[in-house]
Image (cartoon, rainbow, N blue to C red):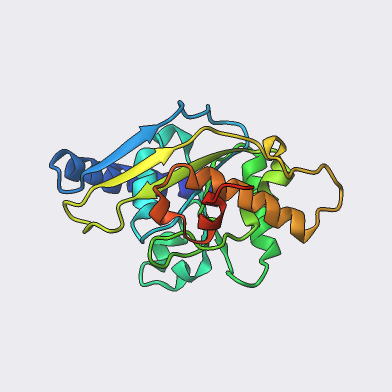
């Protein structure tokens, strides 16, 4: 069985068993999760990135439940998951494993090819989580978007301060945008590290707009009014 078929099979099993179990727990108010759509999600089939803040391990199940199954999403996720005791399972999921902190060009190119082919991808630009406040994001999501002209849909997750069981979690989908709409966008064949960082900051500000102030962390300095 080739990889794409295996991915579809594993994704179907995941959604049938895991997502439906989550739905049951939500119905029973054991997991009181809720979804907010500021605008309707864009149609799938064209380059599309979902970028989200990262507050805990269950962010992925929450996002997987909230995005309709018709999207057949891929994940840009840390390679350490493959060393987990369930690594065999993660290895069959529609996932691009990335070596964090090593400038993994191979993973980045694989993600670009997937997104360019119309596979929606979920990325946590921070790469990890700490206390729920935003960390400085890596530039991977921006690099992928520059190569694919992907529509970027920001996601804001809240509720880390509450227990998982019977504690409310909220996932908010913001309006989609393209990098070309951001103030610091510069059309150039040779993108500088500074311009990548500037675009990443402006992308992350689209996420902070969906979060309460206490979640802003590294990007809290942008809350101050300019003079």
For residue 130, say whether it is visible: yes
Determine the residue located farthest toward the front in the rendered image. 227
User: In the visual, does 117 lie left or right of 35?
Assistant: right
Residue 172 relative to residue 207: left or right: left
Camera sees residue 111: no
Give coordinates of residue 201: x percent, y percent: 62, 52
Q: Nearer the viewer, residue 118 or 216?
A: 216
Q: Residue at x 39, y 46 (%)?
A: 63
User: In this image, 86 relative to 227: left or right?
Assistant: left
* Residue that appears at 64% across and 60% down: 107
Residue drawn at x 68%, y 35% is: 181
The location of residue 73, given as percent across then percent down, is 49, 43
Q: Along the line of sight, which residue is nearer the eye, 211 or 19?
A: 211
Question: From the viewer's perspective, is residue 134 above or below residue 178?
Answer: below
Residue 136: image x %, image y %?
Answer: 56, 62
Q: At which x and y percent is residue 132?
A: 39, 61
Name the residue: 48% across, 42% down: 209
Residue 152 picture quarter: top right
- Farthest residue toward the right? 189
Image position of 71 (left or right of 26) = right
Q: Quadrant of residue 83?
A: bottom left
Image position of 115 with respect to 82: above or below: above
Looking at the rendered structure, the number of numbered marks drawn on it comes to 0
């Amino acid at each position: 069985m080739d990889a794409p078929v295996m991915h579809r099979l594993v994704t179907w099993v995941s959604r049938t068993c895991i997502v439906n179990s989550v739905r049951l727990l939500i119905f029973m108010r054991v997991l009181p999760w809720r979804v907010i759509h500021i605008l309707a999600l864009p149609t799938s089939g064209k380059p599309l990135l979902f970028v989200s803040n990262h507050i805990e391990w269950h962010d992925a199940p929450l996002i997987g439940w909230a995005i309709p199954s018709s999207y057949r999403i891929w994940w840009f996720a840390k390679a350490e998951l493959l060393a987990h005791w369930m690594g065999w399972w993660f290895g069959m999921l529609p996932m691009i494993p990335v070596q964090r902190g090593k400038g993994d060009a191979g993973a980045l190119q694989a993600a670009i090819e997937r997104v360019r082919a119309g596979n929606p991808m979920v990325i946590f630009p921070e790469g990890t989580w700490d206390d729920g406040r935003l960390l400085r994001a890596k530039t991977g999501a921006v690099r992928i978007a520059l190569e694919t002209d992907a529509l970027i849909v920001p996601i804001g997750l809240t509720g880390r301060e509450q227990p998982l069981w019977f504690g409310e979690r909220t996932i908010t989908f913001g309006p989609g945008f393209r990098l070309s709409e951001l103030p610091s966008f510069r059309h150039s064949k040779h993108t500088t590290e500074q311009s990548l960082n500037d675009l990443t900051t402006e992308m992350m500000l689209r996420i902070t707009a969906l979060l309460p102030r206490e979640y802003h962390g590294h990007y809290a300095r942008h809350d101050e009014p300019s003079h």
